[in-house]
């Protein structure tokens, strides 16, 4: 099995004292979708920022371990060099330029690959026809789902070899979530782009992934083939809202349940 990305015993510290990632190790398979799951505050977004070189802007740094992309260390590289290597992160919350048009946002994504702007623009419009309809409209007037499409489309303009997606379903209606995940699957298949998918929607993420990791308090506590994780009773109970007999737990039960981390 070939891997495009490997994190080995990575530790991340913020403000010189706050340890967030505690010896994290994971691998992303070449050409496949890998899910990284966990609750809020587990360290999922920090993991992506460590890969894409964005920690410095938040006074964070990788203090131990190594991050290898295509067998080459990148954890000391600045983000602009990492992007040019073929890694592109779609941030949580979409982060589009609201006072630029849809097409101007996409042009920003083509900064590292301007010669293929028109070709890649048509590719984005193929995946997201609604963006073509709204190409002259300010991004700030798009719906949440359309802004998420724009954020992913902007990443595609750079022709990424590794796409880092941070909570693409956040704040979206169920039908839009299904549409976005279908498009992610299509992009992975047609563009041969490897994907590291950070999600709280565990069922949706594992359904389209080949492999998954579960992150708790800065550490990987479980990993396995996606289908195995979907069928695991602990994952079903803690992340899919299912009880031991397959019944759905109520929000109140989940909220107040004292979790026994049987995998630790």
Image: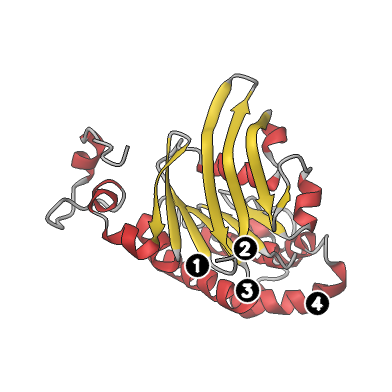
Cα distance in 3D space between marks 4 and 1: 23 Å
Rendered location of residue 127, percent (x, y): 60, 76
Circle nearer the N terminus (3, 4):
4
Dot label at residue 192 = 3
Q: Are marks 3 and 4 in contact (CB under 8 Å)?
A: no
Q: Position of residue 114 (x, y in %)?
A: 86, 67
Q: Position of residue 55 (x, y in %)?
A: 67, 36
At label 2, counting other C-alpha atoms closer than 10 Å, the crowd grade (few under 14, some 14-19, many 20 or more) is many
Q: Is residue 263 left or right of residue 159?
A: left
Q: Earlier in the sequence, mark 1 or mark 2?
A: 2
Q: Residues within 10 Å of mark 4 (few under 14, many from 20)?
A: few
Q: Quadrant of the N terminus?
A: bottom right
Q: Residue furthest left?
A: 245
Mark 1 or mark 3: which comes first in sequence? 1
SS for dot 1 = helix
- Kindly give the residue lying farthest to the front in the view shown: 1
Q: Nearer the viewer, mark 1 or mark 3?
A: 3
**Residue tagged 4:** 118
Residue 180, numbered label: 1
> How far, Cα to Cα, is label 3 from label 4?
20 Å
Q: Earlier in the sequence, mark 4 or mark 1?
A: 4
Asked if labels 1 and 4 touch by Cβ distance under 8 angstroms, the answer is no
Quarter of the image where one finds residue 39:
top left
Please state which of residues 101 and 183 is positioned toward the viewer in this rendering.
Answer: 183
In terms of depth relative to the viewer, which is nearer, 179 or 226? 226
How far apart are the alpha carbons under marks 1 and 3? 17 Å
User: Does label 3 or label 2 sit earlier along the sequence?
Assistant: 2
**Dot 3 surroundings within 10 Å: few (below 14), some, or many (20 or more)?**
some
Spatial CA distance of label 4 from label 2 is 17 Å
């Amino acid at each position: 099995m070939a891997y495009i990305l490997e994190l080995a015993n990575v530790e991340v510290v913020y403000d010189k004292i706050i340890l967030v990632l505690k010896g994290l190790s994971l691998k992303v398979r070449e050409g496949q979708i890998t899910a990284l799951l966990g609750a809020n505050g587990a360290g999922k977004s920090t993991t992506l920022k460590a890969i894409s070189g964005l920690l410095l802007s938040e006074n964070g740094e990788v203090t131990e371990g190594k991050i290898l992309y295509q067998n080459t260390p990148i954890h000391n590289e600045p983000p602009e060099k990492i992007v040019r290597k073929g890694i592109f992160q779609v941030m949580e919350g979409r982060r589009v330029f609201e006072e630029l048009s849809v097409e101007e946002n996409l042009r920003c994504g083509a900064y590292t690959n301007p010669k293929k702007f028109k070709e890649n623009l048509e590719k984005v419009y193929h995946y997201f026809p609604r963006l073509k309809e709204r190409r002259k409209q300010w991004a700030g007037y798009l719906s949440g789902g359309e802004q998420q499409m724009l954020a992913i489309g902007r990443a595609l303009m750079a022709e990424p070899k590794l796409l880092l997606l941070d909570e693409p379903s956040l704040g979206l209606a169920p039908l839009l979530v299904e549409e976005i995940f279908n498009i992610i699957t299509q992009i992975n298949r047609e563009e041969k782009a490897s994907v590291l998918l950070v999600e709280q929607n565990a069922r949706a993420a594992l359904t389209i992934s080949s492999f998954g990791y579960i992150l708790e308090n800065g550490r990987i506590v479980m990993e396995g083939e996606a289908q195995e994780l979907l069928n695991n009773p602990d994952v079903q109970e803690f992340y899919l809202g299912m009880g031991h007999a397959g019944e759905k737990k109520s929000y109140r039960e989940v909220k107040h349940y004292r979790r026994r981390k049987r995998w630790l």
